[in-house]
Amino acid sequence: MRVFTIAWREFRQYFTGVGGYIFVLLYMVILGLIFISSVQPGQPLQTGVINSAFLTLALFTAPFMTMRTFAGERQRGTLELLQLTPVTHWQLVIGKWLGVFGLALVIVLTALWLPISALLFANLDLGSIYAVFFGALCVFAATLAIGIFSSVVAKTVLASVAISSVITLTLWVIGLAAATLELGLIGLPESVTTVIRYSDLSSHFRDSFAQGVIDSSDLIYFASLTIGFLSIATASLQRQR
Amino acid sequence: MFRSALRTTLILILLISINIIGFHPRYRIRLDVSANGSNTLAPESLAVVQDLPPNVSAIGFYTNASGGRRQRAEELLNQYRLASNGAFDYQLVDPDVNPTLAREYAVVEDATLLILNGDTRVRVRLLTEGELTNAMFNALNPRTRQLYFVTGHGENNIADGTEIGLSTLNARLNQRGIQTADLNLLTGGVPADANLVVIAGAVSEFSAAEIAAVDTYLAQGGKLLLLSDSPETADPQRLETYISEAWGLTLQPDLVSDFSYSVLGSPVNPLIWNYAPHPISEGLLDLSIFLRTARSIQLADSADVTTSSLAETSNAASAIAVDGLIAEKEALTGLTIVGVAENIASDGVVLAIGDVDFVSNAVLQQFPNNALLFENSANWLIGDLNAIQLTPRAAVDNSHQIITLTDQVRFIAIVWVLPMLLVIGVGLSVRVSRRARK
């Protein structure tokens, strides 16, 4: 119950100020612009054009969405007060993550309006659309967990953004490194390149959700990243006390 | 503190273990939610892949320059691996890094994919599901592919290494596991093991007995690939009359001339790139085939025989008769260069190409892709491309009615502007109500 109280408090903060609206509008402006500019008379309507933009935006905005959760509280001096309450560390971490995930849910549901309202004008493959938006939620779950961890270990919000960005961007570009390695430029053993390729966050979205496929191994990957980083965040918070 | 670190470590170990198990094809579950199941293998492919013995695998050779073909191969092969519950596996190798392995598999071209079943190696021509499934089927059911090249009428010869010879083509066919041999029709007709008979550029007359041997072979479901030489030199009247009357493919006594799409500075060296949808043309779609002194073909259906044009010249091409007159075309259309006739009753097929020089040694040296037209035609006639026909997928209809400016404005307003105004409106009302409460 305490988890949800913390989550609700966190979620409300985004929408009582302007922060939450700015995030939602940012997604609508960029994704909407890409979507409507892809419409050509006589050509089929392609909802897939927003897939890679969605992924890129999620990776770049997650650090900003989570920066205040712990690092902001620390800067304001309210984190110590929070830790004096009977709330356990894991309740605090999960509650904060749920709150910011709520913001992500609002972003995804608002962005879903783009293809759903386009049904008034065209026939669309709804299954593939739902898969993309479900995939976006999975990406958010993992990147926000990384952001929460960064916010726990960083002393300032800027440091939180920096740490979180480095981790997410590493997971984003690791696929390129894998492609280079596997094509034999360095010639590492196949098992090593397989591990590197598996770590590539973008491929878990691009090769399945964005193609209209929900693959159990991708769900496991995103769930593991989420649980893993939230666990490390909890342990780090305990160590700080 | 120690307990907390231990707990986190155990959680991480557990997560890594779950990922290792979850990554294994045997335990992976894929749910294809696309409207036409475009990410799911066709039932025919599933039937093949789920019955694969454990020693069937694939090896692909892709250099850095192979671009997106490597990724496409990987995506497709991965679907087969998942569907096989781990029975089928594949390996992708860079031949620049591992030239020994490339030599071991006699790989000479980039982006070569082979299906392996023991000593049997089947080359995958195109990265499509149909091709891969048929290649697997052929690897599981190895058979001798025997091509006979008819001799005795001045045909271009498979052993001839001169400019007009077909030795380069012959080497390519042998490399792909197709056996070739000369055939004299007067010594016992067409052998029983013939998968395909090729007449490559006959210039002199066929005897009635030879025509009868060809007719008997085709009546028993045989396949004939006829490559014609220029009408200035070729005169196998009896053969051409037979093909025209019995199979509806009339090789015209003309020379195709195209000032718009030709090479080597001569209009009688036309390029063809207009292909009809067909398994033969699938691998040619982005390629032009160079012809040298080609003839056009006229098609005529009959009660039992269905004809179709597979490749045409550009609309600007014209047919020059042997006497130098330019034949008038009824409409601005291309001239048929590749025509096929199929007999529904006997299952016999004749495929005629209005040129033979396009696969001569001299031309293949400059235009190696020309061999693909011959190889695809031969593979299709042999039955390698269509042993398994996949159930066609329903097309996804994404068409829209956003045509006029009014439609566009309505679309932008409803899809884009309206939700943003709603978000701004909600934000402002929350702000106003909070101020009012203060």
Image (cartoon, coloured by chain):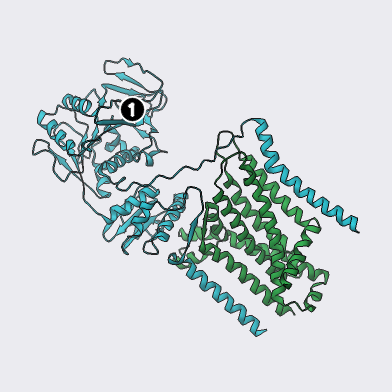
Chain colours: A green, B cyan
Q: Chain of mark 1?
A: B
Q: Is residue B317 above or below residue B150?
A: above
Q: Is residue A158 above or below residue B206?
A: below
Left/right placement of residue B428 relative to residue A39 reads right
Q: Residue at x 76, y 45 (%)?
A: B421
Q: Residue at x 58, y 50 (%)?
A: A129
Q: Is residue B85 visible?
A: yes
Quadrant (top left, top right, bottom left, bottom right) of the N terminus of chain B:
bottom right
- The residue pinned by badge 1 equals B336
Q: Which kind of residue does numbered mark 1 sit on?
A: Thr
Badge 1, how many Cα within 10 Å: few under 14, some, many 20+?
Answer: many
Left/right placement of residue B337 relative to residue A2 reads left
Q: In the depicted view, which residue is nearer to us: A84 or B98?
A: A84
Question: What number of labels is visible?
Answer: 1
Give the percent coordinates (x, y) of residue A90.
69, 75
Q: Secondary structure at mark 1?
A: strand
Give the percent coordinates (x, y) of residue A205.
56, 57
Left/right placement of residue B12 relative to residue B68 reads right
For the view shown, which residue lies furthest in the left direction? B187
Q: In the depicted view, which residue is nearer to us: A123 or A196?
A: A123
Give the percent coordinates (x, y) of residue B216.
14, 35
Which picture quadrant has residue B374? top left
Give the percent coordinates (x, y) of residue A240.
73, 78
Which picture quadrant has residue B237? top left
Q: Residue at x 72, y 46 (%)?
A: B419
Q: In the depicted view, which residue is nearer to us: B409 or B296?
A: B409
Q: In the depicted view, which residue is nearer to us: B235 or A82?
A: A82
Q: Is residue A188 visible?
A: no
Q: Residue at x 33, y 41 (%)?
A: B372
Which picture quadrant has residue B120? bottom left
